[in-house]
Image (cartoon, rainbow, N blue to C red):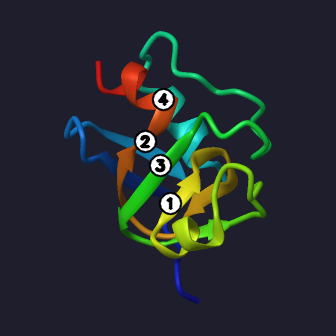
Amino acid sequence: MVATKTFFAVTIADTGEVFRCRADETLLSGMERLGKRGIPVGCRGGGCGVCKVQLEAGECSKRVMSRDHVSAEEEANGIVLACRVKPLSDIRLRVLGKMKIKVCA
């Protein structure tokens, strides 16, 4: 039996910060543990778009995202909503949109 990794390291390319994210939680949930005030978490269901990030490295499982916030072309280029993806490996991401102000300040 092969053991699966429980936690993955997620690096925020903009700041160099690293946080741990469980395989069974979204990137947004893991990011909240950074303890930064005011990280916008919005609806947590993919409908508001405030948690947009670009995956630069690593693999995630994805759930459906609103095309109002992430186009098919963006998704093909690694842009996702952090509330709709869970890590399958260590991740490197870049913060986009409204969340960038709070995460990168």
Is disc 1 in contact with disc 3, using a CB cutoff of under 8 Å?
yes
Residue to which mark 1 is pinned: 79
Residue 58 coordinates in the image, percent (x, y): 39, 70
How far, Cα to Cα, is label 4 from label 2?
A: 6 Å
3 or 4: tag closer to the N-terminus: 3
Is disc 3 in contact with disc 2, using a CB cutoff of under 8 Å?
yes
Tag 1 secondary structure: strand
**Neighbour class for label 4 at 10 Å: few (<14), some, many (≥20)?**
some
Q: What residue type is disc 1 on?
A: Ile
Query: What residue lies at 50% left-to-right and 60% top-to-bottom?
Result: 79
Which label is found at residue 100? none
Q: What residue type is disc 4 on?
A: Met
Q: Quadrant of residue 75?
A: bottom right
Tag 4 secondary structure: helix
The one of 17 and 101 positioned closer to us in this rendering: 101
Q: Is residue 86 above or below residue 99?
A: below
Q: Is residue 87 left or right of residue 57?
A: right
Residue to which mark 2 is pinned: 96
Which label is found at residue 53? 3
**Neighbour class for label 3 at 10 Å: few (<14), some, many (≥20)?**
many
Q: What residue type is disc 3 on?
A: Val
Is disc 2 in contact with disc 1, using a CB cutoff of under 8 Å?
yes
Residue 8 coordinates in the image, percent (x, y): 43, 57
Q: Quadrant of the C terminus?
A: top left
Q: Is residue 47 above or below residue 87?
A: above
Q: Is residue 27 above or below residue 48?
A: below
Tag 2 secondary structure: loop
Query: What residue lies at 46% left-to-right and 10% top-to-bottom?
Result: 37
Residue 43 coordinates in the image, percent (x, y): 78, 31
Is disc 4 in contact with disc 2, using a CB cutoff of under 8 Å?
yes
